[in-house]
Image (spheres, grey):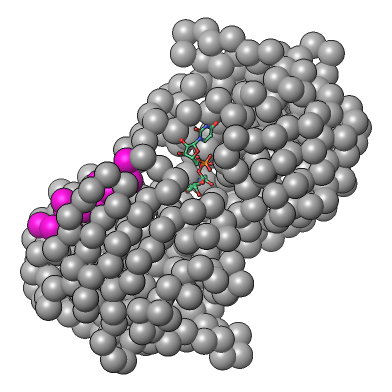
Amino acid sequence: MDRFVIEGGRPLDGRIAVSGSKNAALPILLAATLADEPVRIGNVPCLRDIDTTIQLLGLLGCRAEREAGGDVVIHACDLRPEAPYDLVRTMRASVLCLGPLLARLGTARVALPGGCAIGARPVDMHLKGLEKMGARFSLEHGDIVGSCPDGLHGAHILLDFPTVGGTENLIMAAVLADGETVIENAAREPEIVDLAEFLRACGARISGHGSSVVRIEGVPRLAGCCYQVMPDRIEAGTYLVAAGITRGRLELEHCPLAALDAVTAKLREMGMRIEARGDVVVAEATGPLMCQDVTTQPYPGFPTDMQAQIMALMTVSQGAGTITEGIFENRFMHVPELCRLGAHITLAGQTAVVRGVQRLTGALVMASDLRASACLVLAGLAVQGTTVVRRIYHLDRGYEAMERKLAAVGACIRREKE
Ligand code: UD1
């Protein structure tokens, strides 16, 4: 197992290129199974979750490989309906193959993902929506077994909550269903827009993506296409915070600023300067930063995937602020670890109260999930002294070359074997 050793206290200065979006690439790679011709997908980040997805596509009977230039080429030439538990348990997003498999094959057997560090994360809304489209499900030996012998049909689906994965699964199922599907209270995340644009490039008929009512008119087949994945807004947001927490200055290339409105608004309220200059976004913190109140919400609200990072920033800002988690029930695992570094945070239910401190001090800390790991690295960059972040395999799932990108802008960070 690898760990990061970070000598903090150095302001970052330089340019970082934002990679392709993990959360857009995962559904797009799986949606490639809907096309009966090869698809070529570019700007796919080099991450463990992407490798897992390519492996899953292989098990599903696709030819799927990353070419030397970085593009991933997928041909669903011999599609098979089974996603085994060994793979699904390492990456919950595997459940996104359910919609495409039902749409293409009329049958699917996908292991039910278990809970994870940030909560139970059920998939009931995915299943309820697919049932409305004509699928039937049973749970057999831990697997979701679905079938629709007469094919899927269009349906009117009202989601109880704008679930991101649920909206994606339903859009993917609906593109080949018979007739029109309307998804109300759909998630509006930019990654859903990216998925819909990929599907449209393959010939799907989708409108309203990015709003809370998405309409899909089923078509008989999807063709191949070439598509570039959007940049990663959470990776970009993490590096904006890195500029702030080290009181440095970073220029971000390929920064999807429009998709980061809620994040940049909060960072500016805290006192950071963030502006687009030519083709880069410049983020800097020269004066003191002030704690603010943050509540995570579905897009366009403040993203839960940036909650841990902004908390790290608040631990070394002035005053006090609250952070309320509105999406997941157990997403404060990073709080005790930040406290080990000297942060002052108290928890009351779904709200954390952060009182800024003058300085953090280095310690050994443990990463619990992807974004929690990022927050500990950020805190480590601010610490005077040495911080060791253990279990960074979580980071490798979602941040491409993080230590290389940070080292190139002046961070003292190295990867070690435990
Ligand atoms: C996606 C993102 C994840 C992000 C999250 C919220 C990917 C691969 N992952 O996860 O990084 O943190 O959106 O922005 O894109 N829920 C149910 N029943 C369901 C579905 C969801 O109760 O059928 C609940 C979940 O437990 C959670 C909430 O709804 O509390 C939001 O989940 P959802 O939007 O589905 O998140 P994911 O798609 O899993």
Q: Is residue 39 magenta?
A: no
- Left-right relation of 100 to 221: left
- Left-right relation of 27 to 45: right
Which residue is pictured at 28% across the width and 48% down the height? 332
Label tally: 0
Q: Position of residue 199 (x, y in %)?
A: 78, 47
Q: Position of residue 168 (x, y in %)?
A: 65, 41
Residue 273 appears in view: yes
Up the image or down, 171 lies above or below 261; here it is: above
Which residue is pictured at 69% across the width and 34% down the height? 158
**Quadrant that contains the N terminus:** top left
Up the image or down, 136 lies above or below 333; here it is: above
Up the image or down, 222 lies above or below 23; here it is: above
> Along the line of sight, which residue is nearer the eye, 255 or 76?
255
Q: Position of residue 306 (x, y in %)?
A: 41, 60
> Along the line of sight, which residue is nearer the eye, 261 or 348?
348
Q: Position of residue 80 (x, y in %)?
A: 67, 21
> Along the line of sight, which residue is nearer the eye, 104 or 283?
283
- Left-right relation of 89 to 129: left
Up the image or down, 263 lies above or below 210; here it is: below
- Left-right relation of 413 to 326: left
Quadrant housing residue 181: top right
In magenta, the rendered stretch is 330-340
Residue 72 appears in view: no
Q: Is residue 333 magenta?
A: yes
Which residue is pictured at 42% across the width and 81% down the height? 268
> Along the line of sight, which residue is nearer the eye, 415 or 287?
287
Quadrant housing residue 258: bottom right
Main secondary structure along the magenta-highlighted residues: helix
Quadrant housing residue 344: bottom left
Which residue is pictured at 68% across the width and 27% down the height? 129
